[in-house]
Amino acid sequence: MIEIERFRSLFDQEVLHTFDYLRAIDESQWRGIPRDSEALYLGSRINKITIAALARHLATAESHWISQLPAVPAGGTMPMPEKDPVIEAVKTVPSFIALYEQRHQNNMDRLEALRDEDIGKPLVFAGRRYTGMGLLWSILGHHAYHLGQMDLLMRQQDVEAPEYMEWREKEQVLG
């Protein structure tokens, strides 16, 4: 299995698993503000993060990065993602999941269409130098980081989050 196939299999399972997390919450938990305690101080910034904000951020950033990767010239700089008005307009969990599922399928199709030149070229994003493949692996790490935050926010609201890495795929080797 080549590296891009390895990435696609793991990325797909991680995003599908995220849909399982989102299906475990209701509308109040979607917008629930995290709470601090002396044992778990989250700082001033985290108090503004909700599951809705994290999920919107993932859907927006992933679509941006994966669609922009083939367009950035070798040695070029990828622009930062901007808020997506279509994603920002979605107000309910089921509607968001449906939109994110569609975006994810588009991302998987784009990943399938990447050429060796796309994944091997050098580029700059957020002041850091990557190869296309390096940026893709960073996307996987980014997703896992925010999924962990979602997990914490769910548990703070007394929602039992799915077990991490209990991927949907059980028949094929992942990665």
Image (tube, grey):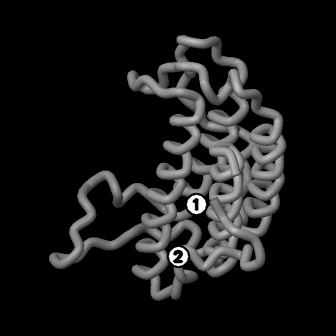
Q: Position of residue 78 (x, y in %)?
A: 56, 21
Q: Amino acid at mark 1?
A: Ala
Residue 35: which numbered mark, if any? none
The residue drawn where x is 66% and y is 65% is 174
Name which of mark 1 and mark 2 comes first in the sequence: 1
The answer to whether 30 is drawn above or below residue 98 in the figure is below
Residue on which disc 1 sits:
52
The answer to whether 45 is drawn above or below residue 94 in the figure is above
Q: Position of residue 34 (x, y in %)?
A: 38, 69
Q: Do residues under tags 1 and 2 come within 8 Å of each other at their CB atoms?
A: no
The answer to whether 86 is drawn above or below residue 141 in the figure is above
Residue on which disc 2 sits:
164
Q: Position of residue 132 (x, y in %)?
A: 59, 29
Q: How many marks?
A: 2
Corner quadrant of residue 99: bottom right
The span from disc 1 to disc 2 (Cα, nearest Å) is 19 Å
The residue drawn where x is 68% and y is 25% is 118
The residue drawn where x is 68% and y is 45% is 2
Q: Is residue 132 left or right of residue 32?
A: right
